[in-house]
Amino acid sequence: MFNKILIANRGEIALRVIRTCREMGIKTVAVYSTADRDSLHVKFADEAVCIGKPQSYDSYLNVAHLMAAAEITNADAIHPGYGFLAENAKFAQICGDNGLKFIGPTPEMISGMGDKITAKETMIKAGVPVVPGGEGLLQSLDEAIGIAKGMGYPIILKATAGGGGKGMRIVWDESEMERAYTTAKAEAGAAFSNDGIYMEKYVEEPRHIEIQIAGDQYGNVCHLSERDCSIQRRHQKLVEESPSCFMTSELRYKMGEAAKKAAAAINYESVGTVEFLVDKNRNFYFMEMNTRIQVEHCVTEEVINFDLIKEQIKIAMGERISGRDYEPEMCAIECRINAEDPYNDFRPSPGRITTYHQPGGHGVRVDSHAYEGYVIPPYYDSMIGKLITMAQTREEAIATMYRALSEYVIEGIKTTIPFHLQLMKDERFRSGNFNTKFLESFVLR
Ligand code: ADP
């Protein structure tokens, strides 16, 4: 049993972990940068330690400061949340070396899945279908042109160290290759200090459907059903839901089995997500595995009535999972409420929240660290919170979402609320007939 967990993160996810720890009777340590002094996660934790200046590399990415904070507070485990050091194998290793249990998979599992080419090779060996192409890093522009010729356009260039949709370029024909190759490589190098890129067949008009999985230290794995994350802007998720309207019992079974196979191939322990692209004929292809808790985990929690953070902590404490698979019993939708101006190319809009009123009522969950007077710092991601609604049917969950969005008052900064309001009324969205390209033709009024 852990006595005290240090949360190496900030904002809503830090608060989310604190809440479950409270329920489990585990003490918490919050860490914060000087820009986050007034954040709710600092106020709600049992103890809080300032770990440095606002820039992430001075604070939330500063491993020495995090280790010192864990030592002076006598914490026995570290929850990394998502982002920052959550998928950093070296950090997981350092935690272990300092006698701290990293609440997540082992460093080997993280590095095995962190590099997308290695992950794909592992999946091919395990018999999990992967997106065609991408056998190895591209060595030159000529090689890229040659492979694309054999495979046929369109193709997509992706960063092997990728994340957050960065370092990705779609190429429709040979004339675009040189420019795409150069920019993808440069972007990957700048974002990940690793400019390795690889090629995949571009799956046209796919849906992004991911499977939540859990594995324990004894080799048991299960899946906890799917999330549809096809509503994306520039390869970044804005809305997630479960179940997927595209899902059938047969497809869920097949994708669930494939996801479990993926996890079992690396003896995965902890909760994780296996991401797939699904084409219009319901063929599915492994894209990547996220070895951490994800932003959109709440959608799954609501449809199967299950606390994923509690499960993650229990697995880290050496408990066994039940091993049974889960089917959605409800419909849930999540809208990401970001401090961004949807009328201005979703430009970040940090600053002080002058008025804040959060929605409530039946079927509504809000995971947010915001409050009236809170200042959204410009240094981190722009998420203010997540609004989740659930009901017996998708139609009702959408109606509840529209009602909840209409109640949500956030003044002083721009937010994505107007975008979500329009989306909830959009006929095509409501019909469920959409794919990852949907937002490209969506015009905000
Ligand atoms: P990241 O780790 O940067 O988020 P992913 O590999 O998860 O990158 O891909 C993000 C999104 O990019 C996917 O959800 C999908 O919309 C798009 N994408 C990635 N690979 C392909 C592909 N081969 N064909 C079509 N779309 C793709």
Image: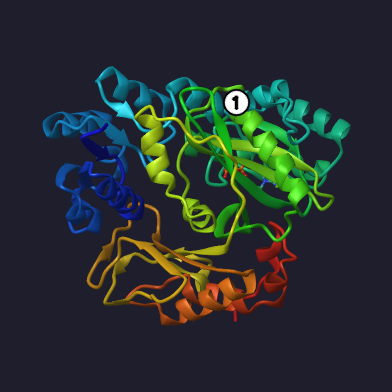
The residue that appears at 67% across and 57% down in the rendered structure is 244
Comparing 191 with 17, the one in front is 17
Residue 24 is situated, as x and y percent measured from the top left of the image, at 28, 45
Q: Quadrant of residue 187?
A: top right
Q: Quadrant of residue 360?
A: bottom left
Residue 139 visible in the shown view: no
Check disc 1 and report the residue beneath it.
264
The residue that appears at 57% across and 46% down in the rendered structure is 165
Residue projecting furthest to the left: 72
- State the SS at label 1: helix
Residue 373 is situated, as x and y percent measured from the top left of the image, at 22, 71
Number of numbered callouts drawn: 1
Q: Three-letter amino acid code at disc 1? A: Ala
Taking the image in four quarters, ligand 1 sits in the one at top right
Comparing 397 with 336, the one in front is 397
57 up-or-down from 307: above or below: above
Give left or right: position of 63 versus 259. left
